Structures are given as C-alpha cells and as structure tokens.
C-alpha cells in the first residue's frame, strides 16, 4: 500500500521521467483474436460466457457482438463484428492510467488490468479507440477483458472462445494468424483476413491484435 | 368490482401518460414536420433548443431518451452544452475514487503526462478536464458535440441503412462520425491533441525531453518558439474549438503549452494530419509528409483567417 515514503519516491521517479513519453512493451509473442464476421450467427454466447466468468452486472460487457446491417433491397447485407479488448501492440489505455493499474505482459502481450488499483478516472475508457474498458458504476472502477489470463496460464483458451459454437472466434499468435500459418477453425482455407472492418477505428492508432474474415461489404484493409 | 376499478384506474393512468407524452412530443413532432417540410435547419434547431429538450426530458424515461432526436443528425449539430447537460450533467460532476479498492490514494498518483507544467489539480474525470477545468477554458473551446456527433442506441455501430446519407455529415477522409463500440471517432477528435510528436517532420531527434534542453533558457522558456515565432509562423489554432489567443499567451511561459497537445499526452502512435496553412515565404516544394495535407481547416471548425 502507498504511504508517505512511497509518495516521495513516486514524486522523485515522476520528476525524472518529466516529458518522457510511454515506450510500449514488445512482447515475446503477441496473442490476438480472429473473428469470422460472416459465419458468426450472433448468438452472443461469447458475451454471456464472458459476463459469467467475470461476474459482471447488467450493463458492462467486455465482449460485444455488433450486428451490422445495410443496403437497399435487393442489395442488402448483414454481418457481425465481435470485439473485446484487442490487446493492442501499442495500447492507449496503458499510458493514460495514472495508477499503473494497466500493464502489458511481456510473455504474451496481454493487456491486463488490476481493478483494485483503479480510481475510476475513466481515462482508459476515453482513450481506447475500440470501447474495451468498461466502467462499473456500482464500484466506480473500470474493468476489461484480460483474455482470461488464468485460463491462458493453465494452457486453455478464454471463455469466449470456448463458448463459440460456430468456432468463428479464436486466439493465437497474431502474426501467425495474420499470415495464415496458425491452424484455426475460424479461418477457412480460402479466407483472407483484414486488420480493419468498415467503421472501425483506425488500427494505426494503437495496432490492435485482432484480424477479421470480413464480409465483402465490410472489409477495409 | 375492485379488480375492474383498478383496471379502470390503470387505463386512465395510461391514457394520461399517453396524453402527456403526446404533449411533450408535440414540439419535437413539429420540428420533425418542419424538417420534412423542407426546412431541415429550422427543424433541427428547434429540436436542439434548451426549452424543447427540457420539455421532452420532463416526460421521458431512459429508454425513450436514448432515441431522442437530439442524439442524431442533424439536430446534434445544433445542440449546445446546456441542452446536453439537461440529462448528462453527471459527466461534469462525477469524481474519481479518493482511494482505490486496494488502497492506492488518488492524491498520491501521478502519470507521466501529469508532470507537465500546464497540468494542475487533483485527479478528475476527463469530461471535466476537457470542458470545465481552468486550463481547458484558457486554451480550448470544446463543446459536447465536438466529440459526440451521433449515436446508435441499438448496436453502437454506424448502420448503412436507408436515409443514413441524410443524417450524417461528410467529414474529411470519409471518416464515420463515430466508430464501432465507440461514441466518438478518435481519429477526428482525440487524435488532434493526443497524437505523437512528429519530431521527424521537423528534422529533430524524437526525444523532446532531451531536445528542449538545447533550445530553452530562462530568457527563452519556450523552445518551440525558437523556430515557430517568426520563421515558421503559420496560421495556427485558428479554429472554433481552440482559444488561439489563450494558447499564444500560455506559450510565452512554457513549451509545455505547445508540447501538451503535440506529443505530451500522446495516447496514440501517429500524429493528426493538421491542415498546412500557407505562410509568407513558404517554400514551394512540399516535404513528403505534407503532400496530402489540406491547406485550410475543416469547414465545420473554420474561422475567418485573421489579417496578418
């Protein structure tokens, strides 16, 4: 727990870092998500499994399945975009946090949060381009997806992935998922992946660790 | 009989509620009718007027309010902060916890960006910092709809449905007014002041904390003005969402007034492609980084260019 001695040390350390910007952690392996926008049926089992695992009250959702619909008859279309925290290579939430509650794991690039260190300033929520940090009003703290680090450390996959009955959501080393060398049922043999779908925030902002098998109306790059 | 009486009363209550809702909605309905009748601007302004918002809010509930027309184009363009704060006043009133659940005291925390000379005060919520803090009032002129340009209560996702074109504004680079899972478009809002310091564009080393030492002294406290006072004197900050004079005044005392928005709070790893207003004796050859830059500010934020 912080005390007066720590306060002086914190001030001293902060003064040394004056005007220095944040240098992102470069992990040994960067884990990330793949989601098949077209084959996803929008059952939201991933959302429910996530809420169940994390004991979330009504309101905050770490994972969100968004129904995208559009066009004019007969040229209509629909697809789903499923996002949680994207465990960005250069996360915006991390440098915005004044208490150090958010950090990036060097071994797998997971951006984790200890909400017991959170003072509820909600800057991480504001800075994230993908709406991942979720404010829990009853506790006045922010929480977010940590890719179920306990499951990862136990050699299993996160609850959302395990709950996906269509196998359209998966995790793995994001570079191998992107270049097609990672075996996953979320990507068919002829599927191409993209880093950004339409109306998604610019990936260059934080380099999110997610790729999509996109709908023809939704692919951007 | 008792059961019938209760039923009668419940029907009467429902009818009364319906009448009240109809009365409250009459203003919005008139405004929407004006829009449909070919005067969209007048209709949108009427929807966004404080009195109309108060009347609708008095007879609304959370679910209805989410679909209030002020949350959508074109009315949101005319919304003033007072109208937004009728329902959203908590954005300026909420406070961070004084102590985290594990005992971290807010007053003892300090992030790297909070070491700047221009950062003052306790930990506060970011809406207050952007709109109501003394420094925000000195250098900025932000309003709610600078960031919040629309909303989709159903999916938090912009939908490509019939009529979308009539309810959105053409932003530069065809950017959506809000992005997936987000109530703003960070590339067109946050990035303007929270992007990386583009030191390489100026031929400077990337570490400003080291570069500034050679540019500043007690007589010249702002190293940025070494070059940007006269040599590269562009038309800068002359937009509706900034207070250009306030920034110039603050810049006399410390380079942190400049650096704060040009790298000192860089959540993101890229820089905003600011418009590049020509200045007297500007070299004819554009550097590569400036080739796709606009030469004027976005029309929605433009002010008349001051005479030199």
Image (spheres, rainbow, N blue to C red):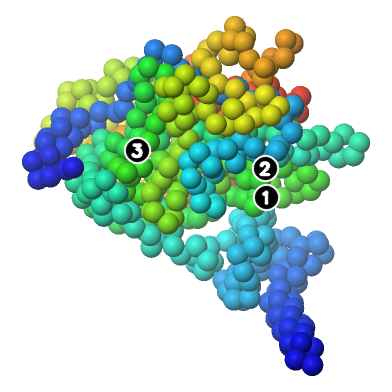
Q: Does dot 2 land on a helix, a strand or a loop? A: loop
Distance from label 2 to label 1 (Cα)?
10 Å
Q: Does dot 3 land on a helix, a strand or a loop? A: loop
Q: Nearer the viewer, mark 1 or mark 3?
A: 3
Q: Residue at x 46, y 64 (%)?
A: B89
**Residue of label 1:** B154
**Residue of label 2:** B158
Pointer 2 indicates a residue of which chain? B
Pointer 3 indicates a residue of which chain? A
Pointer 1 indicates a residue of which chain? B
**Residue of label 3:** A114
Residue placed most toward the observer, A199 or A8: A8
- Taking B52 as reference, is A134 left or right? left
- Can residue B243 be seen? no
> Callout 1 environment at 10 Å: few (<14), some (14 to 19), or many (20+)?
few
Distance from label 2 to label 3 (Cα)?
32 Å
Q: The C terminus of chain A is located in which quarter?
A: top right
């Amino acid at each position: 727990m912080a005390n007066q001695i720590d306060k002086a040390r914190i001030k001293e350390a902060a003064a040394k870092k004056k005007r220095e910007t944040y240098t992102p952690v470069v992990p040994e392996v960067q884990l990330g998500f793949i989601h098949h926008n077209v084959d996803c049926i929008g059952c939201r089992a991933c959302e429910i499994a996530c809420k169940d695992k994390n004991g979330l009250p009504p309101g905050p959702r770490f994972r969100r399945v968004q129904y995208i619909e559009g066009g004019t008859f007969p040229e209509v279309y629909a697809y789903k975009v499923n996002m949680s925290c994207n465990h960005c290579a250069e996360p915006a939430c991390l440098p915005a946090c004044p208490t150090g509650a958010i950090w990036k794991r060097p071994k797998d690039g997971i951006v984790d949060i200890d909400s017991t260190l959170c003072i509820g300033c909600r800057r991480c929520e504001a800075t994230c381009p993908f709406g991942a940090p979720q404010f829990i009003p009853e506790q006045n703290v922010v929480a977010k997806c940590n890719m179920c680090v306990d499951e990862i450390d136990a050699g299993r996959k996160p609850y959302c992935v395990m709950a996906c009955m269509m196998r359209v959501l998966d995790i793995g080393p994001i570079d191998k998922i992107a270049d097609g060398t990672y075996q996953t049922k979320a990507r068919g043999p002829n599927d191409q992946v993209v880093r950004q779908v339409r109306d998604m925030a610019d990936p260059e902002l934080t380099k999110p660790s997610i790729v999509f098998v996109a709908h023809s109306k939704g692919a951007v790059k | 009989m008792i059961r019938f009486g209760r039923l009668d009363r419940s029907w009467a209550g429902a009818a009364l509620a319906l009448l009240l809702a109809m009365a409250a909605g009459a203003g919005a309905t008139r405004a929407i009718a004006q829009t449909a009748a070919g005067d969209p601007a007048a209709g949108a302004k009427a929807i966004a007027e404080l009195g109309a918002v108060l009347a609708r809010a008095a007879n609304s509930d959370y679910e209805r309010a989410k679909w209030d027309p002020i949350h959508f184009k074109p009315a949101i363009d005319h919304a003033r902060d007072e109208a937004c704060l009728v329902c959203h006043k908590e954005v300026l009133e909420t406070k961070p916890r004084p102590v985290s659940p594990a005992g971290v005291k807010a007053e003892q925390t300090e992030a790297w960006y909070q070491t700047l000379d221009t950062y003052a005060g306790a930990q506060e919520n970011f809406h207050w910092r952007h709109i109501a803090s003394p420094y925000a009032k000195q250098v900025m002129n932000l309003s709610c709809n600078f960031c919040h340009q629309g909303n989709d209560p159903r999916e938090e996702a912009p939908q490509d449905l019939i009529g979308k074109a009539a309810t959105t504004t053409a932003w530069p680079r065809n950017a959506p007014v809000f992005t997936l899972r987000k109530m703003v478009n960070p590339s067109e809002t946050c990035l303007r002041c929270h992007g990386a310091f583009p030191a390489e564009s100026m031929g400077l080393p990337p570490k400003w904390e080291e570069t500034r030492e050679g540019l500043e002294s007690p007589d010249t406290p702002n190293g940025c003005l070494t070059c940007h006072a006269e040599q590269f004197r562009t038309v800068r900050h002359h937009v509706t969402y900034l207070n250009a004079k306030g920034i110039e005044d603050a810049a006399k005392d410390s380079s942190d007034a400049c650096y704060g928005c040009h790298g000192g709070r860089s959540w993101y790893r890229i820089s905003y492609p600011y418009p590049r207003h020509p200045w007297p004796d500007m070299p004819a050859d554009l550097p590569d980084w400036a080739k796709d830059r606009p030469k004027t500010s976005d029309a929605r934020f433009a002010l008349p260019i001051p005479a030199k």
